[in-house]
Amino acid sequence: MEEQRAPLQESPHDTPAEPEEEHISSNVCDVCMRDNLLQKVGIIYCNKCRAPFCLHYASKIDVRYCVDCFSEMDLTKEVIHKTYEHYNEVTDTITKYSRKARRIALTGESWLFAQRRIKDMTDAELDMEIEYHRQMFQLIAAEAEERKNRKVHRFAGVRVKVPSTTSSSTTVTVSKKVSKTSSTTAQAKLSALLGTMLAKGMTPDMIAAMLKSK
C-alpha cells in the first residue's frame, strides 16, 4: 500500500511580506507633504543619509543634501595690503608702492566630505558636475549682482565720511581685512523651520509675535 501523505501547509513565514510603508522623515514639512499627495514634487532623497527631505529642508550650500548632512562649513575671505618703502640714497627720496592679495578658504566637515567624493566620480559624472555648478554659479552671481545694484541705488544719496589715515614709517606695512561666514546645522535647521512657517502663509510679524509669546 502506498502511504498517503497529508498536504503540506504553508508556514506563515512563507507568505510574501507586504511592502513596508515608505518612511517620511522629519525633514519634510506639512506643506510639501500635502502637495506630494497630489503630485510628486518637492521631495527628494539626501545623497548622504538617503532620507527624504523637502525643498524647505534642503542644504543652503548644496541642494542635493538635507540640512542635517551638509550645513557645517566656514568661508573665510582675507584681503591683505602690503606697503613697501624704498629709500634712494643718491636722490635722497623715498618711493612707496603697495600690493594687494586676496585669499579665500573653505573649511568644515561638509567641505571635506564634498572633496572626498570627487575621486570616485566617473568622467560623465564629472562633466555633469562641472556644468551643474557652472550654471548654478551664473544664476547665483546674477542674483548677487542684482542685490548689489539695489543696495547701491538705496544708498546713492547717503554721504559717507572717510576717516583720515596716518602714514607709516616702517619699511613694510601689512594690513589684513578678514571676513568670515559660518554655517552650522543648528542655524540651517532654524532657517528651514522659518521657511516652512512662511510656506504655510505666516508673515514675519506673525512669527515674531509667536516667538515673543513663548
Image (cartoon, rainbow, N blue to C red):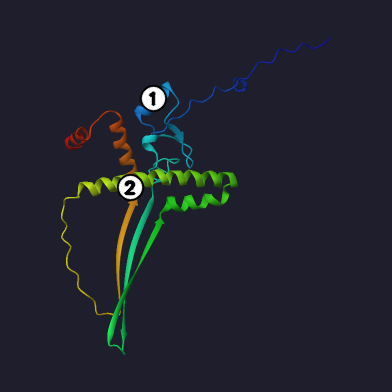
Q: Is residue 150 visible?
A: yes
The quadrant where residue 41 appears: top left
Quarter placement of the C terminus: top left
The answer to whether residue 85 is above or below residue 13 is below
Say if mark 2 contacts mark 1, CB within 8 Å: no
Quarter placement of the N terminus: top right
Can you tell which mark lies on residue 35? 1
Residue type indicated by callout 1: Asp
- Specify the farthest residue to the bottom: 90
Crowding around mark 2 (Cα neighbors within 10 Å: few <14, some 14 to 19, many 20+) is: few
Q: Marks 2/1: CA distance?
A: 33 Å
Q: Is residue 186 visible?
A: no
Mark 2 and mark 1 lie on one chain; the one further toward the N terminus is 1
Toward the viewer: 56 or 100? 100
- Give the x, y percent position of residue 17: 57, 23
Can you tell which mark lies on residue 173? none
Relative to 128, is 100 on the left or the right?
Answer: left
- Give the x, y percent position of residue 28: 39, 32
Relative to 159, is 73 on the left or the right?
Answer: right
The answer to whether residue 96 is above or below residue 145 is below
- Give the x, y percent position of residue 46: 46, 39
The residue at the point 43 percent across, 31 percent down is 43
- Specify the farthest residue to the top: 1
Toward the viewer: 143 or 78? 143
The residue at the point 15 percent across, 60 percent down is 161
Residue type indicated by callout 2: Glu
Q: How many marks?
A: 2
The quadrant where residue 175 appears: bottom left
Mark 2 or 1: in front is: 2
The answer to whether residue 76 is above or below residue 48 is below
Can you tell which mark lies on residue 145? 2
- Give the x, y percent position of residue 129: 51, 45
